Image (spheres, grey):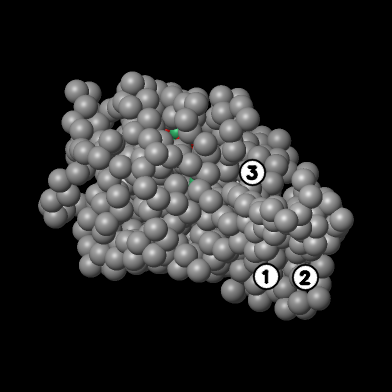
């Protein structure tokens, strides 16, 4: 990889709270997972820092002047425009500290611009309605309405795999809702999050309403979740962490975007070429480190050989390489421990009788795009979330059995169904217990405005800009009892 210098991002070395940048004594050294080189440093904050930060944001939101909605809209529109201007620097930084090849990093920056712009546009939707007091004798003589008000302080905790857009998905809707927000980005990818907060401040977001505290999950994350002045925890990450957060958060409002194990059903009349192409794109993008990654493909026996042949062919064409190389499709996993874990899960499947049709090779943090078949039912590559570039393809004879099997899985985020007969495809889609089904595509698709999330181990509630703004605000009623009416 060429040693490019990213344009200076002065914020990208500390933390921000109580209206100013801080340089904590301890630092997190952020390294490029491809080669171990240091990309930059961020503060390694403490629980005491969290306490100061939350109190400062809470005081600003609860005691300070409200931030007028029109100013929120203008600041977020400005931020979206500025992110567009600074897009190359953001893409470069995102790619270096994370796992995305440069083309994917550019796409993520464009998504983040869209997320911030959509958040600005929600100003129109922060509306209430009058209440039907006249519809009951007890309401006579009263007039009232509700408005949507901020919940207060939002704690945003984010993972490493989409280190910019997932931060944008929490911070921008929280601000549009009139909240204060304290962000704890992933330990491995804090720099692009710091840069985004710096940009929001430049765009006019009041400095006392936002904070970013890089640091460890067990320290900063846990202290944030436990803090009594945090009103809502918005978390994206793994199921185990989500469980720990739920136990600590107690009765606080929580939004959880957790994992998946991406299922795809290919019906006998499907366009097999289209399905094969989409499966390979969906399985190996970001080296499979994507909650929507395609992990399990159920294909009708009649077309199974054709699909498997095409999937294997496309998989061998995937370019694995340096993230800076424009030709690269698949870069590294986030660290060597993750690559070793993926390798061990594949080995376990092979010991149980699985066949490796492509890939199955590791080199440091890289794991090659891998296609498996004949995988034993209890192998973790089937039952758990791989979060790596591994897809398993199995033929089926009964659609009903496939629906039952998918519905029995512990995850239920998104799924895909391929079939030319839309009536049949729709029949399958309607029976799957997941948050979304894409017909004639894999589940690896979303737009940032749609309600996003799933059930079971995949999450609680829905993100997606309009839905996040709604979840981060509460209806508040004001009612007038006319003085001329009896008490
Ligand atoms: P993770 O290990 O759960 O970490 C996510 C965040 O939680 C990180 O900032 C982490 O800090 C923090 N954290 C760890 N322990 C904590 C605790 N006890 N209290 C509070 N915060 C804590 O997840 P990851 O490995 O970064 O990301 C991968 C997971 O995210 C996958 O399961 C993936 O499916 C899921 N994901 C879901 C979606 C979705 O929208 N459904 C999107 C993307 C990713 P450290 O970084 O310091 O550990």
> Which picture quadrant has residue 339?
top left
Q: Is residue 284 left or right of residue 458?
A: left
Q: Which mark is residue 460?
A: 3
The x, y position of residue 79, in whole percent, is: 30, 62
**Circle nearer the viewer, 1 or 3:** 3
Q: Local crowd at mark 3 within 10 Å, few (<14), some, or many (≥20)?
A: some
Q: CA distance from mark 2 to mark 1?
A: 8 Å
Going by the image, does 458 lie left or right of 217? right
Which disc is residue 426 wearing?
2
Residue 17 image position (x, y, % from top left): 28, 36
Q: At 39% across and 58% down in the image, what residue appears? A: 68
Tell me which residue sits at (76%, 54%) in the image.
485
The numbered disc on residue 439 is 1
Q: Nearer the viewer, mark 2 or mark 3?
A: 3
Within 10 Å of disc 2 (Cα), the crowding (few <14, some 14-19, many 20+) is some
**Among the two numbered marks 2 and 3 on one chain, the one whose residue lies closer to the N terminus:** 2
Do we see residue 267 in this rendering? Answer: yes
Of residues 406 and 392, the one drawn nearer to the viewer in this rendering: 406
Residue placed furthest toward the front: 484
**SS at mark 3 in the image:** strand
Compared with 216, 299 (above or below) is below
Q: Give me the C-alpha separation between circle 2 and circle 3.
A: 25 Å
Q: Do residues under tags 2 and 1 come within 8 Å of each other at their CB atoms?
A: yes
| Left or right for 54, reference 428 | left
Location of residue 32 (image quadrant): top left
């Amino acid at each position: 990889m060429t040693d490019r210098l990213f344009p200076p991002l002065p914020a990208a070395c500390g933390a921000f709270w109580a209206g100013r940048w801080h340089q904590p004594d301890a630092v997190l050294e952020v390294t490029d997972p491809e080669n171990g080189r240091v990309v930059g440093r961020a503060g390694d904050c403490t629980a005491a820092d969290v306490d100061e930060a939350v109190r400062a944001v809470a005081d600003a939101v609860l005691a300070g002047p409200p931030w007028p909605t029109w100013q929120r809209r203008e600041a977020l529109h400005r931020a979206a425009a500025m992110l567009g201007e600074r897009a190359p620097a953001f893409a470069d930084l995102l790619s270096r500290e994370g796992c995305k090849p440069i083309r994917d990093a550019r796409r993520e920056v464009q998504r983040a611009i869209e997320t911030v712009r959509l958040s600005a546009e929600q100003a129109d939707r922060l509306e209430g309605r009058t209440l039907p007091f006249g519809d009951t004798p007890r309401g006579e003589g009263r007039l009232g309405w509700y408005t949507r008000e901020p919940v207060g302080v939002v704690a945003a905790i984010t993972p490493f795999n989409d280190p910019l857009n997932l931060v944008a998905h929490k911070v921008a809707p929280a601000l549009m809702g009139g909240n204060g927000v304290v962000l704890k980005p992933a330990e491995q990818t804090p720099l692009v999050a710091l840069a985004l907060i710096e940009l929001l401040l430049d765009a006019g977001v009041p400095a006392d309403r936002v904070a970013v505290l890089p640091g460890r999950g067990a320290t900063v994350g846990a202290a944030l979740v436990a803090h009594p002045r945090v009103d809502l925890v918005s978390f994206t990450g793994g199921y185990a962490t989500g469980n720990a957060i739920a136990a600590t958060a107690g009765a606080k409002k929580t939004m959880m975007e957790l994992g998946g194990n991406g299922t795809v059903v290919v019906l006998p009349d499907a366009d097999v070429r289209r399905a094969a192409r989409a499966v390979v794109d969906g399985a190996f993008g970001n080296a499979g480190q994507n909650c929507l990654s395609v992990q399990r493909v159920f294909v009708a026996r009649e077309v199974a050989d054709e699909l498997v042949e095409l999937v294997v062919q496309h998989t061998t064409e995937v370019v694995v390489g340096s993230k800076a190389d424009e030709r690269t499709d698949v870069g590294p996993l986030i660290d060597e421990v993750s690559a070793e874990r993926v390798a061990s899960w594949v080995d376990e499947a092979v010991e149980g009788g699985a066949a490796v049709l492509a890939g199955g090779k590791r080199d440091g943090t890289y794991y090659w795009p891998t296609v498996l078949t004949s995988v034993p039912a209890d192998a973790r590559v089937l039952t758990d979330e791989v979060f790596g570039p591994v897809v398993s393809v199995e033929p089926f004879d009964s659609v009903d059995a496939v629906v039952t099997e998918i519905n029995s899985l512990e995850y239920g985020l998104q799924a895909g169904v391929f079939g030319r007969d839309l009536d049949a495809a729709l029949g399958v889609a309607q029976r799957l217990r997941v948050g979304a089904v894409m017909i004639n595509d894999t589940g690896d698709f979303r737009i940032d405005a749609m309600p996003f999330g799933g059930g079971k181990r995949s999450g609680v509630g829905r993100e997606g800009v309009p839905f996040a703004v709604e979840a981060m605000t509460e209806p508040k009623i004001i009612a007038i009892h006319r003085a001329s009416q009896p008490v």
